[in-house]
Amino acid sequence: FITGMEIVGPSKRLWAGVVIEYFFALGLVLLCLVGYLVREWKYNEIVLSVPSAFILVYWWLLPESPRWLINRGKFEEAKVIIRKIAKRNKVEVTEKQLDSLECDETATGQLWHLFTSRVLFVRTIVIFINWCVVSMVYYGLSLNSGSLAGDFYLNFFLTGLVEFPAYTLCLVLLDRTGRKKLHCACMVLGGLACISTIFTVLYLEKRHQIYSTVILAMLGKIGAAAAFAVIYVWSAELYPTVVRNVGMGASSSCARIGGMVSPYIADLSTLVDGHFGQALPLVVFGASSVIAGLLSLILPETLGANLPETIEDGKAFPNHEKKSAKYQENGSSITMNNEAFSPEDCTKF
């Protein structure tokens, strides 16, 4: 994911960040199918593990990120990749321009650098909270499908199926509305849909509860899936290149915390009796989603902006282009035909 985000220009980051999510949704649908057809858990694990071997092919097919190589001082390797990219895109890059990529000092960064200023600290914490909550809601709604009325396999299948329109929504709107507005809207509206299940459980007749509760839960899943896709793209654009890997890794760790908590929240329906207990997990997921979505408004918009390179760029973002001229001259930006040029500008995919 990170390589895809770094190897394309701003106009293609939407596709690099969102299209990959369709395959995640496809995996959920196939998981339901495998679970339905292969009931013995031992054989089920074998069937699900075998496709992972195909990931080894990435070693030969996926190029390293030129941005990462440049920031690590591996200029010759970066030049080789940039030449291939430029050739494929029919862009002429001279040796002089490639030599300009080399800088005297290689920029490096560690995770703790994200906490060295108030701006980065607040942004990082908000990103971590959103990753944790969106993961908790995303996986919680899938795990809670067994508590919903109706067939378990059908409900789980629906939780995977509704992700396809969610990601399509992101492809259509993400470059029109921006990351901030879309993420906040998905979190808040999806959260409100989950909270609304309390009214269907308490006030609707039994025969109407089944469909209304499932529909509201699926709307919540659409919001969570769309927000997950947005936060992947958004946070990758917010983290400076020198700490993007560790930043995304730390964010993913926070998401795993949310994923670990979600089964216990889903089990609240078995601990609390009555109709309220049935709706309690969805209410908790919904309230958490609304709060995290509103917190995300603190983060800056990244639509159309160049990726921040250094920690200083991250502090100044979104005004980093004005404050990092020296790094652009000596680091990963050069001038081509009097226009700004950076490694991902000559990418096609």
Image: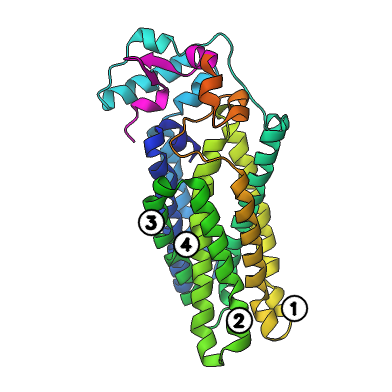
Mark 1, residue position = 271
- Left or right of 320 on screen, residue 109: right
The residue under label 4 is: 28
Q: How far apart, in angstroms, are the residues tagged by discs 1 and 2?
A: 20 Å
Of the residues under marks 4 and 3, which one precedes in the sequence? 4
Helix, strand or loop at label 4? It is helix
Position of residue 206 measured from the top left corner of the image (x, y, whole percent): 56, 91
Please tell me which residue lies in front, 84 or 119: 119
Disc 2 target residue? 199
Residue at horizontal 70 percent and vertical 67 percent from the top: 264
Q: 10 Å neighbourhood of mark 2: few (<14), some, or many (≥20)?
A: some
Q: Assess whether residue 340 is covered by the magenta stretch.
A: yes
* Tag 3 residue: 168
Q: What amino acid does circle 2 point to?
A: Phe
Tell me what residue is drawn at x 46 percent, y 37 percent: 5
Q: Is residue 202 above or below residue 28?
A: below
Report the amino acid beneath label 1.
Leu
Q: Is residue 68 visible?
A: yes
Residue type highlighted by circle 4: Leu
Q: In which quadrant of the rendered view does residue 280 lie?
A: bottom right
Sequence-wise first label, 2 or 3? 3
Between the C-alphas of marks 4 and 3, the distance is: 17 Å
